Every structure is written in C-alpha cells, then in structure tokens.
Image (cartoon, rainbow, N blue to C red):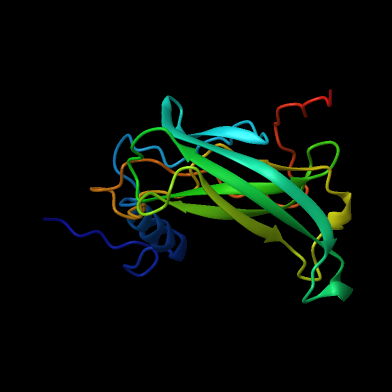
Amino acid sequence: MTVRQTRYGGRAPAWVTVTAVAVAALAGCGAPGEDRTPTPLGTAAVEVTVVREAGVTYPMRAAITGWRAKPHPQAPDRGDAVFFDYRVTRTGPVPESRVSLAVCAVDASDMVLLCTTVSVERDGAPSPEKGDGSLGPTGSDPDLSRTARVLFLPNQMKDDGRAGDPKDHDGYTPPRLPGPGDQLRARPAATPR
C-alpha cells in the first residue's frame, strides 16, 4: 500500500471533507426508485370524491353544505372568520382509519384566502357524517370577508405515518396544504336556477 503525501500536509481540503459528509448524509435519504414528490393537488369543488393518488379513489364523498363569513364571537375585533358545514358520505369500506381533507376559503378568482384540514374517522361515525369548522381569524389572516366560496380538495392529506421509513413507507406523499395566495384549480361554481 502506498500513501501519498499531499501539498495540504496529508489532510484533504475542507471542501472535500464537506462534500464527502454531504454525500454520505444524502446517501440514505430514499430507497432506490422511490419518488418522494408530493402528489399534485386535485381539482377543488364544493363536492368531491376523495382520492389518495392517481388511480386510487376512496368510496367517500365530501361536500360543503353551507358557509358564512362573519366576525368570530371570541375575537370580533380581528375581522371576519369563515364558518362552514360539511357532509361526508361513505359508500363502502375506507382503507384508512382516518381521512384528512383540506377545506379552503377562496376569492372570486379561486385564489386561496385560507385553508385548514378536517379529519373523518372511519369507525364509529354514521354515514353520512356531518360536521362544521371555521377558518380564521388570527389577526394576520387575509380579509376573509372577500370569501366567494368554500371548497374541498379531493386529496387525502394524511400519509401512512411512515414517511421517514424507506422500508415500510407506502410511497404516498400527500400534497402540501395550500396557503394564502395560492391559485386553485377549481370546478366552476354552479349557476343558480
């Protein structure tokens, strides 16, 4: 075995050490062929069929049944909050114990004002399951009085809980929750009759 002395006094330059450490750290970040790209957001609508990823549809529909923008009774000085009612109907067994769905208040051009998630438990709840929720205010929220409609996104927003485990993770990475200013792809609002 031959050992060569470098002009750096036998030590590698700092950039070589940093590069080697970075490569070693990244080497285990994903299994070969595993794609950790988040699933694209589906088309938002007042009523959606729940999907987990392309081609995987759940026997579950979620619908916004009503909404109103008004001052929050506990923080009236912070502006309007959006209160919404929803209904979730299961037409068959759902493979996961909990489904988490995004609900967004959008303006007239389907620009997100604010989003939250609602969770639906598989067991113990009657179908259809009814619920309610609210968005805002926290003081830094956009002006929720501009809300034109409240929409569900069809995507399951919860992964399998093992995203950091390359051996057991099922590969599903949910989309990120949209934030204020994000443009949603949405079905047109129904025209009143």
Q: Where is residue 13 in the image (x, y as percent from the top left)?
A: 42, 63
Q: How many marks?
A: 0
Q: Position of residue 162 (x, y in %)?
A: 32, 54
Residue 14 versus residue 126: which sits nearer the camera? 126
Residue 37 versus residue 60: which sits nearer the camera? 60
Query: Measuring 77% from the left and 29% from the top, which residue is drawn there?
Result: 189
80 above or below 61? below
Query: Is 174 situated left or right of 96 in this image?
Result: right
Q: Could you tell me if residue 38 is visible in this image? A: no
141 above or below 34? below
Q: Position of residue 22 (x, y in %)?
A: 41, 57
Query: Measuring 39% from the left and 62% from the top, which residue is drawn there?
Result: 17
**Image quadrant in which you'd find residue 150:** top right
Q: Position of residue 136 (x, y in %)?
A: 74, 63
**Image quadrant in which you'd find residue 134:** bottom right
**Quarter of the image containing the N terminus?**
bottom left
Query: Measuring 64% from the left and 58% from the top, which residue is drawn there?
Result: 133
95 above or below 137? above
Residue 78 versus residue 62: which sits nearer the camera? 62
Query: Which residue is farthest left?
Result: 1
Query: Is 32 situated left or right of 36 in this image?
Result: left
